[in-house]
Image (cartoon, rainbow, N blue to C red):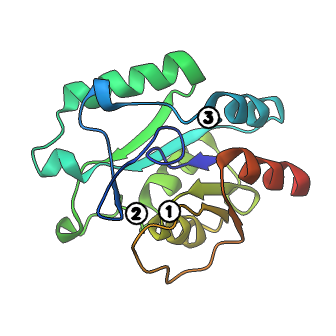
Amino acid sequence: MFLDRDGVINRAIVRAGTPYSPRTVEEFEFMPDAAASVDRLRAAGFYLAIATNQPEIARGNLSWTALAAMHALIERRLGISDIRVCPHEDRDDCACRKPKPGMLLAAARDAHLDLPGSFMIGDRWRDVAAGRAAGCRTALLDYKYDEAMDVRPDFTAASLAKAVDWVLSIS
C-alpha cells in the first residue's frame, strides 16, 4: 500500500485552491481518519509505504530537520517507517518526483512488493499518475483542488477511510 503524505496522512495547507505541505512541525496535523485507516490496512496484511513530493525543500521553505521531525511523528503514531521523499521540483526532471513512479518502484524493489497487487492512495493527479505508471490500482481522495485531473483513478473517495473501505472490499 502506497500512501501520499500531505492530504492523506496529514492535512495539506491549501492556498488559493492548491495544496502545500506543512513547513513546520507546528503546522503538521494528522488527518482524523489516518490512524484508524492505517491500522485497518496493517491488520489486512498490507505493507505500508509513504511516497511524498516535498519540493519546498528545493525551494528553501522546508528544512530537512523539520521534515525528519514530521516523519518521526508518523513513525511513532502510525508505525510507518518506509517513507520515501522526493525533495525536487518539476524542473529538476528527476525519476522520483511524482507523477513519475520512481519512489514506488524503489519501495517495491526494496520490500519485494507485487505492484499489480498494490494500491496508491493520494489526493492529487500526480499520485494517481505515479500509481498507474507503477502498475498499481489507484484511489483519489477528491478534495476539489483547483487543478486539472488528466488521469483517472480506479476509485474516488471523500476520505482515506472510504478509500480503505474500497481497497479492503476488492482485496
| CB within 8 Å, label 2 to label 3 | no
On residue 34, the disc is 3
Looking at the image, is mark 2 or mark 3 nearer the viewer?
3
Q: Which residue is the extreme one toward the bottom?
A: 150
User: Which of the 4 image quadrants contains residue 128?
Assistant: bottom right
- 75 versus 120 height, above or below: above
- The residue at which mark 1 appears reads as 127
Q: Residue at x 71, y 29 (%)?
A: 36
Secondary structure, mark 3, is helix
How far is disc 1 from disc 3 in space, using C-alphas?
A: 17 Å
Q: Which residue is mark 2?
A: 98
Q: Residue at x 45, y 36 (%)?
A: 83
In the rendered image, residue 11, in percent from the top left (x then y), is placed at 45, 41
User: Which percent across, then down, holds residue 45?
Assistant: 80, 35
Q: Amino acid at mark 1?
A: Asp
* Label 2 with label 1: CB-CB less than 8 Å: yes
